[in-house]
């Protein structure tokens, strides 16, 4: 099981969600159309939807081993919730996904949060690989994955249907890391 504890970096805090995070997450991330473009969901229409997401992904399974969970990414200075880092453990491998608010793009925050989260995920004794998929047009996430040391493993044709692009499934790159295990 990954360390489901608070993680601190130079500028960020990755932590368990709090109910009062919903407004900031909605305003910064979940309600923003640009932040939802490459996700399997549309932007949240209201704060209530973000509250439900927090309950499902960030609170409910925090204490249960081998269940999907999320860290809220917040600024260390004022603890403002700016994004999410999701981990989905599946036996010997863990799938990850991440995102932050648009006004925080281009400042290295996702790579900083990712390095802390990956370090925690690798501490799980059974973890042999960490992986994710990324839409072929999502160059920002591709750059983050490269910075985090992930390897491009190939492409999955017609893998994800992203509401922002309509009904046709989209091609995705597969990225994986096995660097921390022999």
Image: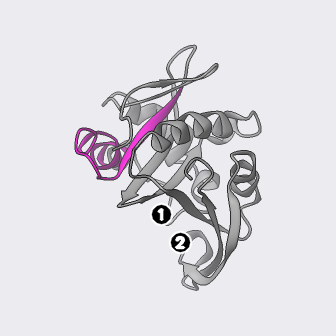
Element carrying mark 1: loop
Residue 48, image x, y percentages: 32, 45
Above or below for 182 versus 81 = below
Front one among 75 and 14: 14
Indicate whether residue 54 is drawn in magenta. yes
Which residue lies at the image location 54% right of the left edge and 42% below the top edge?
118
Tag of residue 41: 1
Identify which residue, 51 or 173, lies in the foreground: 173
The image quadrant that residue 61 belongs to is top left
Query: In this rendering, is residue 19 above or below 162?
Result: above
Q: CA distance from mark 1 to mark 2?
A: 6 Å
Quadrant of the rendered image containing residue 64:
top left
Judging depth in this view, the residue of 47 and 71 nearest the camera is 71
| Magenta residues (range) | 50-74
Image point 56% across, 62% down: which residue? 132
What is the basis of the colouring in this image? one colour
The image shows residue 13 at horizontal and vertical percentages of 51, 24
Q: Residue at x 56, y 80 (%)?
A: 159
Q: Is residue 135 left or right of residue 43?
A: right
Q: Read off the residue under disc 2.
A: 163
Pointer 1: residues within 10 angstroms few (<14), some, or many (20+)?
Answer: few
Element type at marker 2?
Answer: helix
Which quarter of the rendering shows the N terminus? top left
Is 17 left, or right, of 182 in this rendering? left
Res 83 seen here: no
Q: Which mark is residue 172?
A: none
Residue shown at the point (47%, 63%) measured from the top left: 41
Q: Are marks 1 and 2 in contact (CB under 8 Å)?
A: yes
Q: Kindly give the residue lying farthest to the front in the view shown.
A: 182
């Amino acid at each position: 099981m990954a360390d489901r504890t608070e993680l601190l970096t130079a500028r960020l805090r990755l932590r368990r969600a709090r109910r009062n995070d919903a407004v900031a997450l909605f305003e910064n991330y979940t309600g923003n159309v640009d932040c939802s473009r490459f996700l399997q969901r549309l932007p949240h229409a209201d704060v209530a939807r973000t509250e439900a997401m927090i309950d499902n992904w960030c609170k409910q399974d925090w204490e249960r081993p081998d269940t999907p969970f999320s860290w809220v990414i917040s600024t260390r200075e004022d603890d403002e919730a700016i994004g999410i880092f999701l981990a989905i453990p599946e036996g010997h491998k863990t799938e990850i996904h991440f995102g932050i608010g648009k006004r925080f793009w281009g400042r290295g925050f996702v790579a900083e949060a990712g390095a802390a989260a990956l370090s925690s995920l690798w501490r799980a004794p059974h973890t042999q690989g960490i992986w994710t998929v990324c839409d072929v047009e999502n160059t920002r996430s591709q750059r983050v994955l490269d910075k985090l040391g992930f390897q491009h493993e190939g492409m999955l044709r017609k893998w994800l249907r992203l509401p922002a692009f309509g009904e046709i499934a989209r091609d995705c790159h597969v990225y994986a890391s096995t660097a921390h295990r022999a």
